[in-house]
């Protein structure tokens, strides 16, 4: 196809380039001009393609729902003039992306796949297949959904998908599904394959495809430095598009990572303007629990659970946290009730994460009730499940609980489990949990060395602050870059100066420059 300067095709190429450069306003403007050019030239198919593309941009990037609806309606109207083409399938896919009713969404996605088969459009076929697979997983039909995602990814690797945006969407749907199902192993396998795909398309990394969900998967997998990078970038990227809901989702996941790291104040800063709904309930409750505010933690979790279907798998992490909250408050009956609800969900949906989570909750309740044998049985089941699911944080937490259950009758085995838990927490750099494991070891007569440090002296966060000082950033700029309060920055700067024996920020910047060489 010849590309006429200033024509619809040329403007469409310009828009695609702007989009890949993350210049979303310029991309949208170029797609709008492309739409007008296609209309002027009487190219109905091109106009439909631009209209549904603009609908997707406003639905996913800017969050302007009315504008999205308008462009989608325009695409549907123009289909009548476009004649028979694959565009009818793409419009069905775009409609499905924003359809709230699950059965209707699935019907639209099946329609899109049917159109793709008729017109041999593999980009459409496997993008729609990935969306259908992810939707099935989020409907707790994991056994039906994951094979579709695997097939779509295999098609990408097999060069059956040649559109960069389609590749992006397919990977993103995989990460979203794996995050929901806590399927770290599947995500990790496709991430390794995806590195080659990224190189083929000359893209920086698979993480660029879907920072938010990828960051969530990395957090669960214990790859926290990578998760930190992905989620921090996700917050920044969603800010470029004004999509506050998506930016909020990234901030919630980053706050969850901060809680796991023991950086409670930073987590609170990230959630300062976030309402306590189901998505944010877990890190918000964890912050309250860390501060001993069990009543507030339980309230946040109860409100989050009230927004979810009673038997949905997505409720499992909230119920697991609720068990911990009630036990911390001394409410054994309420803890047992939450554990029973979790066990019912695990029995309904199965899967290693759900089964292990239910076993850990039941083991914790039994341990609090003095039922040592029952506690040990449940905790060993949880240990096997989390090991199989490759979830290192949950595995270390279970080891610590098992050590507590064994401390009285089998102190030698308890000591081994506590040491394994401590090693796991130290590898993750989970400061608060390191302290808990160290406390248990001391009760067993061992005094562990639990200092978590980088470069021998600074904490990980202090090292980050030092590096930014070396780049000449001010405290407000460091606050914005790391998503922490200015007061916290001041605290870290003071620690850096004291630990390194420096007298000023200028000396700290010079030190950072020397050590970076």
Image (cartoon, rainbow, N blue to C red):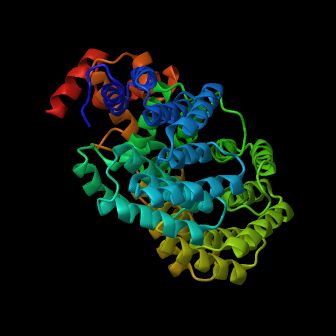
Q: Position of residue 163 (x, y in %)?
A: 34, 47
Looking at this view, is 28 or 319 the one in front? 28
Quadrant in the rendering for residue 481: top left
Looking at this view, is 215 or 374 the one in front? 215
Q: Position of residue 179 (x, y in %)?
A: 53, 56
In the depicted structure, whether residue 293 falls above or below residue 219 = above
Q: Residue furthest right?
A: 333
> What residue do we see at 26% from left, 25% from top?
4
Q: Position of residue 401 (x, y in %)?
A: 61, 68
> What residue do we see at 44% from left, 43% from top?
211
Quick check: can you spot residue 420? yes
Quick check: can you spot residue 436? no
Q: Is residue 345 left or right of residue 271?
A: right
> What residue do we see at 78% from left, 72% from top?
369
In the depicted structure, whether residue 481 falls above or below residue 398 = above
Q: Position of residue 483 (x, y in %)?
A: 48, 29
Quarter occupied by the N terminus = top left
């Amino acid at each position: 196809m010849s590309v006429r300067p200033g024509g619809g095709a040329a403007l469409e190429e310009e828009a695609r380039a702007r989009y890949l450069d993350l210049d979303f306003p310029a991309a949208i403007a170029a797609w709008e001009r492309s739409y007008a050019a296609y209309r002027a030239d009487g190219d109905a198919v091109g106009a439909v393609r631009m209209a549904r593309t603009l609908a997707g941009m406003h639905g996913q990037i800017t969050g302007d729902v009315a504008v999205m609806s308008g462009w989608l309606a325009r695409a549907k109207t123009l289909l009548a003039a476009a004649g028979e083409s694959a565009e009818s399938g793409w419009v069905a896919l775009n409609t499905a992306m924003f359809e709230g009713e699950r059965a209707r969404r699935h019907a639209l996605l099946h329609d899109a796949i049917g159109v793709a088969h008729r017109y041999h459009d593999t980009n459409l076929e496997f993008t729609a297949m990935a969306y259908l697979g992810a939707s099935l997983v989020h409907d707790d039909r994991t056994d039906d959904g994951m094979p579709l995602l695997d097939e779509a990814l295999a098609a990408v690797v097999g060069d059956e998908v040649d559109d960069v945006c389609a590749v992006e969407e397919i990977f993103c749907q995989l990460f979203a599904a794996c995050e929901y199902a806590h399927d770290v192993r599947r995500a990790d396998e496709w991430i390794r394959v995806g590195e080659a795909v990224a190189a083929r398309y000359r893209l920086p990394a698979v993480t660029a495809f879907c920072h938010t969900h990828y960051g969530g998967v990395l957090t669960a997998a214990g790859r926290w430095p990578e998760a930190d990078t992905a989620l921090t970038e996700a917050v920044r990227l969603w800010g470029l598009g004004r999509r506050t809901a998506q930016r909020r989702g990234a901030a919630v996941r980053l706050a969850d990572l901060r809680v796991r790291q023991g950086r409670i104040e930073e987590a609170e800063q990230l959630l300062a303007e976030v309402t306590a709904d189901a998505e944010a309930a877990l890190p918000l409750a964890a912050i309250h629990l860390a501060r001993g505010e069990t009543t507030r933690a339980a309230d946040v979790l109860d409100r989050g659970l009230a927004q979810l279907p009673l038997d949905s798998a997505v409720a499992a992490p909230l119920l697991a946290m609720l068990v911990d909250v009630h036990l911390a408050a001394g409410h054994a009956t309420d803890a047992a009730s939450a554990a029973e609800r979790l066990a019912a969900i695990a029995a309904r949906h199965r899967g290693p994460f759900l089964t292990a989570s239910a076993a850990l909750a039941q083991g914790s309740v039994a341990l609090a009730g003095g039922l040592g044998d029952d506690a040990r049985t449940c905790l060993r089941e949880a240990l096997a499940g989390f090991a199989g699911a490759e979830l290192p944080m949950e595995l270390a937490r279970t080891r610590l609980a098992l050590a507590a259950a064994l401390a009285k009758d089998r102190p030698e085995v308890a000591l081994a489990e506590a040491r394994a838990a401590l090693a796991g927490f130290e590898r993750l750099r989970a400061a608060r949990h390191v302290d808990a494991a160290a406390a248990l070891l001391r009760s067993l007569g061992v005094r562990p060395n639990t200092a978590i440090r980088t470069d021998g002296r600074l904490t990980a966060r202090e090292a980050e602050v030092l590096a930014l000082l070396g780049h000449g950033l001010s405290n407000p700029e460091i606050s914005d870059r790391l998503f922490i309060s200015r007061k916290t920055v001041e605290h870290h700067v003071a620690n850096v100066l004291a630990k390194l024996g420096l007298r000023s920020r200028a000396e700290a910047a010079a030190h950072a420059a020397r050590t970076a060489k």
